[in-house]
Image (cartoon, coloured by chain):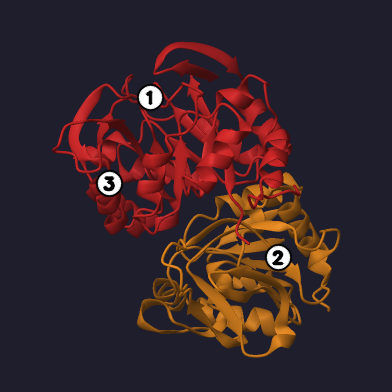
Chain colours: A orange, B red
Amino acid sequence: MLAIIDYKAGNLTSVKLGLEFIGIECEITDQPARILAAERVIFPGVGAAGAAMQSLRELGLVETIKSVVASGTPFLGICLGTQVIFEFSEEDGGTPCIGLVPGSVKRFAPSDPMCKIPQMGWNAVESAREHLLFEGIEDSSEFYFVHSYYPSPSDDRYTIGQTEYADVRFASAIGRGNLFAVQFHPERSGRIGLRMLENFSRWDGQC
Amino acid sequence: MLTKRIIPCLDVRNKKVTKGVKFQGNIDLGDPIEMAVAYSDGGCDELVFYDITASAERRPIDIEMVREVGRVIHIPFSVGGGIETLDDMYRVLLAGAEKVSVNSLAVANPAIIAEGARQFGSQCIVLGMDPVRTDDPRFASGYEITIRGFRERTGLDALEWAKKAEGLGVGEIVVNSVDADGTRDGYELRLTRMISTSVRNPVVASGGAGTPQHLIDVFNEGAADAAIIASMTHTGEYTIKQIKDELVKAGVPIRRKW
C-alpha cells in the first residue's frame, strides 16, 4: 500500500485521484504506524512552513518521516512536503524544518517589480542528472508550479532538475537515495505528471 | 520560463456546457465531463467551471460534477458559482478542484477572501470580477465592479477592489470585462494591463477572445498571466493546438508538450 501523509496542510484529494486514475492503490493517513508500514510514502502539502511543522509535531509525524526515510522506503515529497524536508525555511520569520536534505528554502526576491509572486503555472524542468522518476519524460517538459519559496540544497549533487523563475535557477527536483522531492505538482501536471507518479509506484528507492 | 496559460471556461447549466452573449440567449454546447477530457488531452493549461445558475436558483454547486471532473482530468481546474460559505469552498476543494472562485459573494463579504486564504491557502482562492466601463468621475480607474451576472452595480472601483483583494490574500484575479464579454472582438487590454501591473497576483484576462491574435495581444500588451477562452474553441473554430502554434510563432512562452 502507498500512504499519503495527511497533516492538515491543504488538499490531498488531487494526489489520490491521480494515483487512482493510473490504478495505484493508496490511503490518506495521519497514523505513524500506517505510514511506517507502507511500501511507499507520498508527502504532499500546500500552505505555509510554520503551520506545517507545527502540525507535523502535534501529530508526532516528524520522527515518523525520519524513520521511514531512514528505512529505505521510497519517499516522494511534493511542494510544501519538499520544502519542509530541508533544514530550514525562510518562511514565517524563519522555520527550522525536518532536515533530511542539507540546505534551505528561500523566498523569491525578483529585481523586477512586475514579476508575479507566487509563481503560478507551468514551467520547464531541465535535467541536471538522470533519475528513474523522469523515465519516459522528455527533458525540459513543463510541470505545474504554485509557490513563493524555493528549495536551495547546499550540495549540487542532490539536484536532479532545475527551473528558472524570478532571477533564480532553483532545484525543482531533488534526490537523495530513496528520497525524491519536487517543488511542482505531478498530480496536476497532466499526462507527464501521471507518468512521474507511475514511475514512483515502480521505483525501488535505488539510484 | 514560466509559460502563459490558456484556460477554457465551461459555463454549466443543467449539466450542460452553455454559452451566451451577455448572459442572454444561451445555447447548449455539450457534456462538461467530455469537454473537460477533450480540452485536457488537447493541451489546455487549466480549466474553469462556472455553475452559472446555482446562485440564481439558490442551490449549492453541483458537487458530483466537480468530483467527476477531478476523477478524469489531472490539470488544475477552478470552480465558481453557488459558493456562499467556507464550507462550500471546502467541499469543492475536497472534491478535487485546485481553486475556488468567488465573485458576488466577495463583494458582499470581503472577509471570505481572507478566511478562505487562511484556511485553504491563498493559491486556491480566486477572485472573479466583472468591471464595466464608466465615465462617472467617482471611479478613478474608469471601471466599476458589477455583480450577479452584470445585473447590479456595486459602487466599487475596479482597481481599488483588486488592490483590496490582494491585501486580503487572494491568490489570483480573473478580470472579466463586461464590455468585451461575448463580443469576440478581443480582450479589453487597457483594463487587463491596469490591474495586472498594479497587483502582485497573477491576473487572468477574460471576455472578448475571438482569434489567436487576441491572446497574443492580451499577453503582450495586456500583461496578462493567463487568458480565458470560450466560444472560439467550444464551437470548434480553433483548437488549443492552433492557438498555441500562433502564440509560439509570436514569441509568447507557452507549454508545448502535453
Q: Earlier in the sequence, mark 1 or mark 3?
A: 1
User: Residue at point 52% right, 11% down?
Assistant: B27
Front residue of B61 and A94: A94
Quote the CA–CA distance across marks 2 and 1. Answer: 40 Å
Amino acid type at circle 2 is Val
List the residue tagged with mark 2: A125
Q: Quadrant of residue B168?
A: bottom left
- Determine whether the residue tagged by mark 2 lies in a helix, strand or loop: loop
List the residue tagged with mark 3: B159
Front residue of B55 and B131: B131
Answer with left or right where residue A131 lies relative to residue A98.
right
Q: Chain of mark 1?
A: B
Residue A96, placed above or below residue A81: below
List the residue tagged with mark 1: B54
Q: Nearer the viewer, mark 1 or mark 3?
A: 3
Amino acid type at circle 1 is Ala
Q: Quadrant of residue A101?
A: bottom right
Amino acid type at circle 3 is Leu
Q: Nearer the viewer, mark 2 or mark 1?
A: 2
At label 1, counting other C-alpha atoms closer than 10 Å, the crowd grade (few under 14, some 14-19, many 20 or more) is some
- Determine whether the residue tagged by mark 3 lies in a helix, strand or loop: helix
Quote the CA–CA distance across marks 1 and 3. Answer: 28 Å
